[in-house]
Every structure is written in C-alpha cells, then in structure tokens.
Image: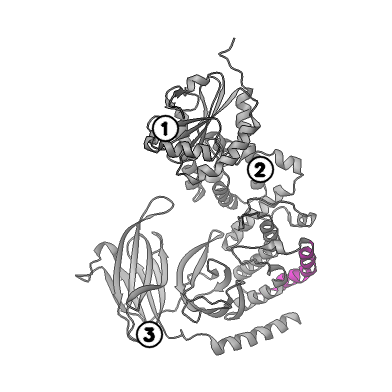
Amino acid sequence: MQLRLDKIVIFIACLVFSLHAGAQHNTHYVTGTITEKVIAELWVNKLINGKYQRIAGYKLSPDNGNFVFAIPKDTGVDYRLQINLYKPGGRHPKMDKILALPLNLNAGLNYSLKITPSKFDTIKKTGWVLKQDAGKSSIALIRGKIVNVKFNGLQVNLQHVVNGTLVSRNSFITNKEGEFEIPCQVKQEGFYYLSTMRWTVRVYLRPAEQLELNIDGLKGVLVSIKGGAVNQLLYQWEQLISPVTSYGYNLTVVTADSIDVESYINSYEKLQPAMDEFIESVDMTDARTLALVQNAMRIDRELVPINFLYHLSAKNVNGFRASPKDFNEVPVFYQRFLQPGKFSSASLLSNGETRHFMNLYTKLNVALLPKEKREALSQGEKLKLMMNTISNDTLKSFFFNDQMGQIEVSNLSEFTETFVPFKQYAKWAPAKTTYQNIHGLYAGDTAYIGKSSYNFSLPDTNGNMVSMKDFKGKVVFIDVWATWCGPCKAQFPFLQELEKEYHHNKDIVFVGISLDKTEAKQKWLNTIRKENLGGIQLLDDFGKAFGRKYEIAAIPRFLLIDRQGKWIEIRCPLPEAKERLRNYLDKALEEKDVTRK
C-alpha cells in the first residue's frame, strides 16, 4: 500500500513540476566528433554584455571524441565554440592551444559538427564542418531546476560510471532562474550522476530518455522527478530511506557530528525491514537493469550508515573540518555489515558508489579489530587485511589502485613492504600505471642508500663549516626546509616534539638544512629565532652543495644517517607521522657503532 501511495505523490509532484519547469525547452542540439585522438575540453560561450561567457562544457579523451550540446534557441545571440587542446603527460595535462569557431545556428534546427584540429584554420575556414542534422534518436535529455538556493550561474556536471567511480563529461551553467539542460549520448543504459561542488544526485538514463527534475541545491536531494519507470522507482527508494540519509549522504562535505549516534542507529534499525522489503519487491523484465538497480539499493542500504560514521570521525581543526582518514570509535551495531563474499562480482563496477563503498567497508573491517591488535599493524599488514575482504580479482585491482593513492609511503623500503606483496593486482590499468609511477619516484634512491654522507660541508649560524664527519658515531636526522616553504614550517611543531622526546639521548643529532640563498641569510636567522628551532642549523646556498647533489626537488624532506655516516634513508616519514618516524629513529639508535672498540 505504501508503494501505491508513493506513486500518487510522485504523480502530483511531477504535475506540479510540469507547470513551472523550463523555459529552456526551445533548444538546438549540436552533436559532433573530433576526428583525431586528442585530450580536449570544449566550451560553448555566449556573448553577454560584450564578453563571452561559458554556458556549457564537454571533456574529451583520446578514446572518446564524441560530444553533444543543448544550446538555447535565443534569436540574435552570438555563440562560439572554444576548443582547448592539451598536451598528454602527467596527472594534469598542460594547455597546448586554443581554437575557436562561431556557431551560426538557425532557429528550429539541429546540427552535426565534425572537427579536425590539425587542419583548423579560421581564415581559410577549414578543419570543421557544421551542417544541419535531423537525427537525435540516442540523445537523452535532462532538464531541471536547482531550487532553494540563490545562485546564478551554477555549474551542473553530468557524470557517468567508469569502473565503479564517476567521471565528468559534459556540464551546463544554470540561468538566472536556476534552470539547466544537459544532453547525453547514451549507448548503453545505466546510472548517471548530476553533480555540483556541493552534491551528487543519481539518475538512470536510457537512449532518448526525457527526464525532468528539481533538485534542492542545499540538501542535494530530488524534490520532484518526471521520467521513466526506473527513475520513478529510484525516487521512491530515496524517499523511503530519507530518514537515514538526511545527514547529507549526497553532500560533498558532511557535518554529521550534530546527530546523536544512538538515535541514528535506532532510526536505521526501525527502517531496515522496510528497506529489505522494498529491495526484494523490485521486479523488472530486464535482468541487467534489475541487477543494477538492486545492487544500487543494497549498496545504499549499507553505505548510508557507514558513510555517516566515517564523516563523524572527521576532526575540526581551527574551524576547518578535514576529511577523515579512518574510523574512530565504532559501535558494535556496525558488526552486522561485515559479511563474507560481499565483493565477489565485477558487475558491481557498474555502480558509481562501488569504489567508495569498498574503501569504507575495508576500513571498517580494520576499525572493528581490538584496539591493541589494530594499533600494532604495519601499513602492509593493514592493507593485507583490507585486500582479503574483497574476493574478486578485478575489484581487488581497482581497490589496490585506490589504496596506493591513499596510503603514504615515504621511500622505496616502505613501497616494497606495503605494495610489492600485491604486485599481481597491478597487471592492469589503472593500477599498473599507479604502481609504476610510485615506484619510479623512489627507484633512484638506491644510488644513495648505504653510501657515505661525508661528501658535503655547510656553514652554521655562526659561519663555521660543518660536515657529517663531525657526527661520526651518532645517528643524524636531517630536516631540509626553507623560509619560503609553508609545508616545512607546518612540520616544525611536530619536529620540536621529537627533539624534546630525544633530548637526553646523546647518540642522536638533529640537523636542519635550509635551501635559502646566501643573500637571504638574515631572513633565515630570523626564522630560526622566531620558530625557536633547535638542533644544528645549516645553510645550503639554493641547494648548491647539498640539495642538488641529492636531487631534492621538493621540500620538506627528511633524511637519516647511521652511526657509520652512511645513509639509512633519504626520504623519511614526516614528523607529523610520529609513530612511523620514531620506528626509524629507534631502529637506527639500536644499531651498534662498529667503529668503536
């Protein structure tokens, strides 16, 4: 009976929606392709008050050069397509060139556009073909309005699912009424997500789907929807689970600490039977769609409370709420979510929440261990436990890739201990590329480890030359910094805590090496006094004697020398990772000085 009532409510909401949604129904469709393999971003710009302003965008990759835009049919308005081409390489490709062509669109017509960047010439008018196009059978269209916010020109992105996570393709800038219109070329039906910097909303698209919706811009939830049966079903599901998602399940930043955990758990337990019944009652003739929808609902059912607890673990530092890295206290209630075989099928990668769910689920497994056992785990042991909760090798590969981006390894030895045991899951992209890139950062360090550090001398604060030979028989911990380096200064308090901890140990020396120029000596001295820096402070004139010799391209950097004057590590953990760093120092201090008789 509840489902029938929900359908009536949806019908009324859609009827209300149809009365006020969209003055943007008069639209040009421009469907096109770039004929060459490029990394590009396309912008549709509109001339407003003498300046071109972006109203829509589309990202292209070498393996997908197709695009589609919905452009309002505004009589007499000047539109222009800007093509931003990027050079491949690195995580952030650099801009190569910008091309621009006018979009001369006649009222009532749709267009196809073919672009060949290498032949592009605006004077000769070569490199593109724009012509009328009558067909748009596979284009799905999402029309909508952002309500409950006073914001003109909000960028709404359309994301699609790629291997269990979300990738942005096209975007549209809302008009002054908060309306947007986004077309999408749908080759295979499935989940898509509308997103802004604040929230993400899930929809289901089929070829030629016509979807209209209103979204609460503050809460990131659907207010009303008009579309196909699957979207209606998803809307019913979201309405059902709203008592346990209202903390901000769809939001990018969540302030869940205002909600009492015990009350939340009680609400969830009361709702759980209805959620279970709803999922089992879903009935569709198409087996693939049924699996997709039920998987999405099952993920929601468990991810919703786990995500709540995870965000509850975030710490508020100086008014800034940082994203948590792990769970804090975990109530016994959460034991029910730990079930073998949960991640046994790669089909889960068709859901946009899967990778996030795997990340939190595996961390929850570790968090529920007894405190003593949990705190005794090394990074490698912790990763092993997390990997063992996933049974499918394809899912393991994507999970391994994501963890390599989260787990901090400081050097080659940590890389070897933490990641090498799972090298078999780095056979495929993207884990293969991530693994190789991280390994490449540290592979060159073997040229220094175990070698003598007695190959440089630097002046101290009094101008006296100091060599590492002066500390033979002692362990030397080096901090490489500069007065202009904010992250370096952020480590000073943690470093001072360590220095205080080892203050009475005469077998360790703390050395600071600044990469400031000699001309900035006074600024260097002032900083030492202001920050109350301890240890022995040395000045390396813009890295000429030390920094360049050891290829130090980024700071802060921490290095460790043994009692014999040989390098133990030239990349130690940051002092803020006190426990990890203390292990390095204590181990070095335990080593005997073989030079003593």
Marks 1/3: CA–CA distance:
63 Å
Whole-angstrom CA distance, mark 2 to mark 3, is 58 Å
- The magenta span reads 262-283
Q: Which mark is residue 540?
A: 1
Residue at position x 72%, y 84% in the image: 5
Look at label 1 and name its amino acid: Asp
SS at mark 1 in the image:
loop
Question: Dot 3 corresponds to which residue?
Answer: 74
Q: Give the alpha-carbon distance from disc 1 to disc 2, as whole Å.
A: 39 Å
**Dominant secondary structure of the magenta stretch?**
helix
Q: Position of residue 183 (x, y in %)?
A: 46, 75
- Closer to us: 55 or 427: 55
Q: Residues within 10 Å of mark 3 (few under 14, many from 20)?
A: some
Instruction: Give the label on residue 382, or none.
Output: 2
Check whether the beta carbons of the residues at disc 1 and disc 2 lie within 8 A of each other.
no
In the picture, measured across the screen, residue 331 lies left or right of residue 480, that is: right
Q: Is residue 137 shown in magenta?
A: no
N-terminal-most mark, 1 or 3: 3
Circle 1 residues within 10 Å: few <14, some 14–19, many ≥20: many
Residue 63 location (% of width, % of height): 40, 60
Work out which quarter of the rendered image holds the C terminus and state it.
Answer: top right
Instruction: Give the amino acid type for the residue marked by disc 3 in the picture.
Output: Asp
Query: Which sits in the foreground, 48 or 211?
Result: 48
List x then y, in percent, for residue 57: 41, 69
Identity of the residue furthest to the bottom in this view? 19
Query: Contact, CB < 8 Å: mark 2 with mark 3?
Result: no
Residue 22: x, y in percent? Answer: 50, 85
Outermost residue, left side: 124
Horizontal side of residue 16 vs 440, given as left or right: right
